[in-house]
Amino acid sequence: MVDRLEVSRRKLLQGTTGALALALGGGTPFLSSRTAYAAAADVAKQQLRTIGLSVTVQDRILADFKAKSGVGGTSGTAATFPDAQTKILSGSKDFDCWETIGERLPAVTQTNNIEPVPATALKNWANIRDTFTKSSPKFDKRAQITGQIWADDAQAKLWMVPAVYNYDSIGYNPTVLSDEEANTWTAIFDKKWKGKSGLNTDPLIALGQAVMAMNTLGMSDVKNPGNPSKKQIEEAMKFLIAKKKDGQFRALWGDFGELVNLMASGEMVVCDAWQPAVMAVKAQGKPAKYAVPKEGYRAWSIGPSLIVGSPNKEAVYAYADYWLSGPPGITVSEQGYYSPSTNIKNVMLPEKYAFWYEGKPWAGKGENGIKEGDLRDGGSLETRAANVAYWHQWPDEYDFVIQKWDEFLSA
């Protein structure tokens, strides 16, 4: 029997790539009109139904994708990773694509809920950054993104096509905390900020941060905060529960807008944060900075995964490739994330690329709270990438993490 995935791959190569080449332009090779029209007709019959964080599931991005690909229609559902994971594992047929984070892939690969995307289906894959193809000797392979996204050692098929990535840190109010006080993961748990600190509701985020803080405080010595042992998890959760009972946290936040509002209002002065939220607070004219933690950043990547049984495979392939084309990377880059494709440099204004990627001062008219001469918090992509404490990964003791996290939530 001919492999269905291979048939889809050949169909894609004959069609969808041509449609995107025609639609996107920008230096991509044009195919013959006959091939391009055939591709457009094929994708036009399909829908893209995606679910993921509001980081990437944005109406303007979906509208741009629809216009450029010719896909028949798009719909996006914003959901936290745990909520989306629950929907998919329950067998929901409402989605073609989960824009997931690399660490959560085992939840759906081991249960056969997603299928790989052939790298050959992505005409823009040639310009992917080395971060996604070459493993760092600093970490075990599965403890970094190269050990998570690939379905095979030959790097021919992807469980997840990276669309955005970043190195996360601590957001803080610089009129309340000094840089020295904020540049450590212990700041979130410091009694000095009792009742004005914030923590993310995702246990795989909160756990690693607690472990890093405990390491610095001399309470533990965990080599990989992304994959602690059962005993280390228990100790970290005891630490978190004690802090919660003591009133350390103003809020356990899970939504981008909630985080922005809490920081902008001054209700939270220090918290684990997404850099775009810090930028959004600054855009309101409120004081906000992004720390450079001495322990290092939390690294992650989000991207589309193809849900098994989707009737819209070509639309998912086209969507994944669209993310690597360049233009959608502008939207997320100007929020404070990074595009995994070097194509971004060809489409972003040089002065903006210099600020967001190269650590150079902002040039020209200010916008969104950034003024002429300002520097991006943390510096260049190269500088920040060299200061990674760990990449998020699926912990060996995941079930135990969830059990203990439930105890934390009910404490």
Image (cartoon, rainbow, N blue to C red):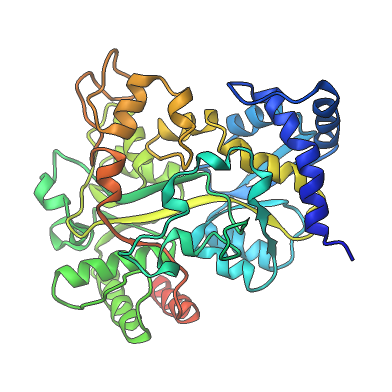
At a point 33% along the width and 76% down the height, the residue shown is 237
Q: Would you place residue 339 above or below residue 193 in this image? A: above
Residue 18 vertical position relative to residue 301 in the rendered view, above or below: above
Q: Residue 336: x, y in percent?
A: 37, 37
Q: Which residue is at the far bottom?
A: 231
Q: Residue at x 51, y 51 (%)?
A: 302
- Where 339 sits versus 293, above or below? above
**Residue at figure coordinates x 80%, y 38% from the top left:** 14
Q: Which x, y percent locates residue 97?
A: 67, 51
Q: Residue 227 at x, y = what percent? A: 38, 74
- The quadrant in which the C terminus is found is bottom left
Q: Say which of 67 and 346 sits in front.
A: 346
User: In the picture provided, is 61 more to the left or to the right than 89?
Assistant: left
How many numbered marks are there? 0
Query: Taking 339 as reference, is 82 left or right?
Result: right
Q: Quadrant of residue 365?
A: top left
Which residue is more in the foreground, 402 or 105? 105
Q: Can you see residue 209?
A: yes
Residue 239 image-quadrant placement: bottom left
- Where is residue 150? Give x, y as percent: 56, 61
Query: Residue drawn at (16%, 50%), measured in percent from left and top?
Result: 182
The answer to whether 68 appears left or right of 379 in the picture is right
Is the N terminus in the top left, top right, bottom left or bottom right quadrant? bottom right
